[in-house]
Image (tube, rainbow, N blue to C red):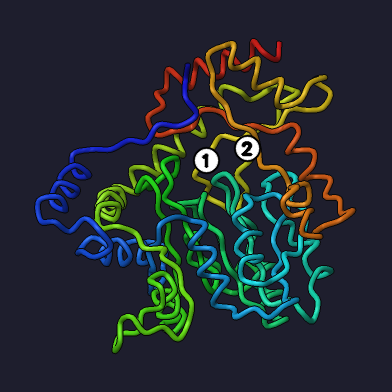
Amino acid sequence: MIPVNEPVFGDREAEYTAECIRTGWVSSAGRFIEEFEQRWAAFCGMEHGVAVNNGTSALELAVETLGLKPGDEVIIPSFTIISCALAIVRNGGVPVLVDCDPVTFGLDASQLESRITPRTRAIMPVHIYGHPVDLDPILALAKKHHLVVIEDAAEVHGAEYHAGRAGAAPQWRRCGGLGDISTFSFYANKLVTTGEGGMALTNDPAVAARMRSQRNLCFRPERRFYHTHLGNNFRLTNLQAAVGVAQVERIDEIVARKRRMGHRYTERLNGIARLQLPVEQAWARAVYWMYAVVLDEAAGFDALEFARRLKNEGVETRPFFLGMHEQPALLDRGLFGGERYPVTERIARQGLYLPSGLALTDDQIDQVCAAVRRTLA
């Protein structure tokens, strides 16, 4: 079976983690944590990094800084992981949904302004499957309505966006460096992994300080076990950060490899009439975190059946996200009743992603493509 993902580690990861074990710095203090935060923030073009135990925690910290009051709203795409809605609900807010773009699967900015109300506090665009969201119109609306932008960049490590195209000096900028706060996941299937882990980035030192306090139970520096606020234990370990530092050292090599893999898939799957392939927009440099395809409904079967047939061919796949408006845990809370998001619904039924991990060989990509062609013949 060709797996969806396998992480790749090298000698540097082993060297750095061995240092942690040898010196005893294996918990939530040690030199690698600050180095990881600084390196990743600098890579993304941000000033401050706050490392945490996973990407969901990073989102929760980011939303917590908004100081939401009951009824305050944060706009998110329906097509995303439940962590986005969870972060809002757990901070006392109300997630408000928009549908996704049918090509990039990111938040459809054309639907955004109609969802802004006097209770809206923030917009949370989510870069999907390695392709950037078109952020210029989102950032413009946020500025117009005085809203915070929380950029969920969990799936776009190293991807770039051609920002400010309507202005005099547009420039390529890395995803995760465009919002007021950005969040990342370093789960095992990400381009940079620490096994589990995440980070929030910001240019605002006060926001960074608040997130650092929140991740560490809101201990007060002058009196450790005296608490004036309720925080969380979202700390990352030095062991995990050591792996992250080693991975960041070769991020350019990782991004180049992922882009080559995506292009190889496209070359070999191009021309299959019933299959929508990833498209790299002119304003984006995608990293093909997962090679995501959508089966045309005219094929006569859905993604679940497509996955079953590919599994019989020795190819492991994963389904697309199910829209937030179809999640029972959120509907049970009285959210999204009767709402419909047709693009999200279609791609959730018809989409899956193919093996995409860094350990995947060119020969395996060719085998996957041959299996897809046989399955759709």
Question: x and y percent of residue 78 in the render?
Answer: 73, 53
Seen at 39% across and 41% down, the residue is: 256
Label 2 near label 1: C-beta < 8 Å? Answer: yes
Q: Tell me the element at label 2.
A: loop
Question: Which of the image's four quarters has the C terminus?
Answer: top right
SS type, badge 1:
loop
The vertical placement of 103 against 236, above or below, is: above
- Outermost residue, left direction? 22
**Vertical arrangement, residue 165 with respect to residue 82, above or below:** below
Q: For this view, does 369 lie left or right of residue 48?
A: right
Q: Which amino acid, by three-letter code, is at mark 2?
A: Pro
State which quadrant residue 203 falls in. Answer: bottom left
Residue under numbered circle 2? 278
Picture quadrant of residue 313? top right
Task: Tell me which residue sits at (51%, 33%) in the image.
Answer: 263
The residue sitting at 74% across, 57% down in the picture is: 108
